[in-house]
Image (spheres, rainbow, N blue to C red):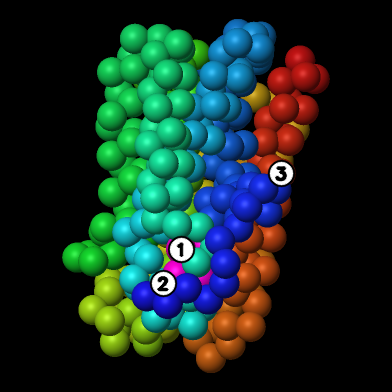
Amino acid sequence: MTQATGQASGLQSIRVFLEMIKFEHSIFALPYAMIAMIWATDRGWPGWRVFLLILLAMVSCRSAAMAYNRIADRDIDAVNDRTKMRAIPAGLLSLRQVNLFFFASIALFLVASACLNTMTLVLSPVALFVTIFYSRTKRFTWLCHFWLGLSLGIAPAAAWIAVTGHLTWPPIFLTLAVMLWTAGFDIIYALQDDEFDQANGLNSVPARFGRKRALIISRLSHLFAVVFLVQAFAMEPINWIGWLGPVFAAVMLTYEQSLVKVNDLSRVNFAFFTLNGCISVGVFIFVLIDRLAR
């Protein structure tokens, strides 16, 4: 593997690490974890200690998963025009640097889990396995999008357990909603690589079923994501302001699906990042306003 540029150093290396783990994509799952935290707490606020530990656990677990993804896929990324400028194949970070970051992230996650409660510590290896193993699923199953969805979807369940020490139905329905929502938009994103995946023996819904059927599966995933989101909200004592959250998500997902066509992928990035970031933040804002208005 040829390194295209020199390794990053100083402040530049921080920027490269943040780019490597796509830190801005934390906005997908984090708001749903905060929703679960609010619902799990009588007053909507568990205190700064629990809040910061939840935040640390989420960021470190996701960082470990993204670092492992870059490690596992470094050879694949190097031959894909869309990904060959990622940190490792471009030579911006060494494999050793990314490995150190990976193990440091795992250590932080385990410490944060241990500081929350016994149940979070006991379940922390499960969370790590779910989030990290995603990188391997594309090698043997087209269901990889749903595994990725589960790795983000466990965020609200984990936040609920962090606050209460147990699990119940509202966060489970939130987990299912986030899982299907994520799978739906990841299938859209994978449309860009369908030919590459087929040529290199990688699995995805577009590579397995073609673009037309992939879009149908994506739309069905988003439909059921809204169904589960409504079910989660129905189990909580919320007023009409809170119910605007699922309505907002349904409208935005409909718009997102309208942007992508079988023969037109020009707006995939806008549909993938911008709209989905707006959806998660928007739903959270309605839940927060609902709680503050009581």
Disc 3 residue type (three-letter): Gly
Q: Tell me: 213 left or right of 247.
A: left
- As helix, strand or loop, the secondary structure at mark 2 comes to helix
Q: Residue at x 23, y 79 (%)?
A: 201
Task: Tell me how far mark 2 sits from mark 3, CA to CA.
Answer: 33 Å
Earlier residue among tags 2 and 3: 2
Whether residue 35 is visible here, answered yes or no, is yes
Whether residue 209 is visible here, answered yes or no, is no
Residue 213: which quarter of the image? bottom left
Q: What residue occupies the far right of the structure in this picture?
A: 293
Where does the magenta region start and end? Answer: 86-90
Disc 2 residue type (three-letter): Asp
Earlier residue among tags 3 and 1: 1
Task: Assess whether mark 3 and mark 2 are in contact (beta carbons under 8 angstroms).
Answer: no
Q: Nearer the viewer, residue 254 or 18?
A: 18
Q: Tell me: 29 left or right of 146.
A: right
Q: Nearer the viewer, residue 190 or 252?
A: 190
